[in-house]
Amino acid sequence: MQEITIRCKKILGGVASGEAMVSHVPISWVSEVDETDGKIVPKAHELEGMSVAGKILIYPEAKGSTFAGIVLRTLAHFNCQPKAIIMLKKPDHTTIQGIIMSNIPAVCLPDKNPLELIRTGDLVEVNATEGLIKIKEKYIPVRFQ
């Protein structure tokens, strides 16, 4: 596989590599993410029951809330925050506060749509300092016969 690079805007610098976790719908940190384990709570959400802990979280945008920053900081307290965050749109101020308080490398406004290029399970590197996302390896599910 040829490495794919996406350019984007830095929210908070840093570098992180890991497994991608992709949501095609916005996420509310307050009502949709369990603060103690990072699991996505809503029934029928494409990521229901999966934890953001240690993942490269990719989603369109945050659903605004005045407590989003506190939830991100609480996730970091319990060591279940994402390794990095990638958003298509510019985040709201409280999400930015949570990213900073939790020291999570984060980017937004990519020049290519990562929701079309990256799937949950792909290996991704985020260099938020330089505003780069690199798709390192595509996830290939194992099929047993």
Image (spheres, helix red, strand yellow):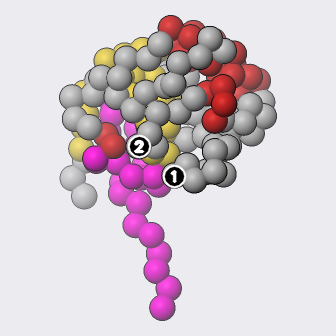
Residue 51 position, x and y percent, is 64, 45
Kind of residue at badge 1: Glu
Q: Quadrant of the N terminus?
A: bottom left
Q: Where's residue 128, x and y in %?
A: 40, 22
Q: Is residue 96 visible?
A: yes
- The answer to whether mark 1 and mark 2 are in CB contact below 8 A is yes
Judging depth in this view, the residue of 50 and 24 nearest the camera is: 24
Callout 2, which amino acid?
His
Image position of 137 (left or right of 64): left
Tell me the magenta residue range: 116-145
| Percent x, y of residue 77 | 76, 24
- Disc 2 element: loop
Q: Residues within 10 Å of mark 1 (few under 14, many from 20)?
A: few
The 10 Å Cα crowd at callout 2, few under 14, some 14 to 19, many 20 or more, is some
Residue 60 x %, y %: 39, 32
Q: Which residue is most to the bottom?
A: 145
* Residue at image coords 58%, 33%: 82
**93 relative to 31 in the view: left or right:** left
Indicate which disc residue 129 carries: none
Residue 20 at least partly seen: no
Q: Is residue 108 above or below residue 18?
A: above
Question: Disc 1 versus disc 2: distance between alpha carbons?
Answer: 8 Å
What element does badge 1 sit on? Answer: loop
Q: Which residue is mark 1?
A: 46
Is residue 67 found inside the magenta-colored segment of the image? Answer: no
Does 125 appear in magenta?
Answer: yes
Snapshot quadrant of residue 34: top right
Q: Residue at x 42, y 49 (%)?
A: 123
Which residue position holds label 2?
24
Q: Is residue 34 left or right of residue 135?
A: right
- Sequence-earlier tag: 1 or 2: 2
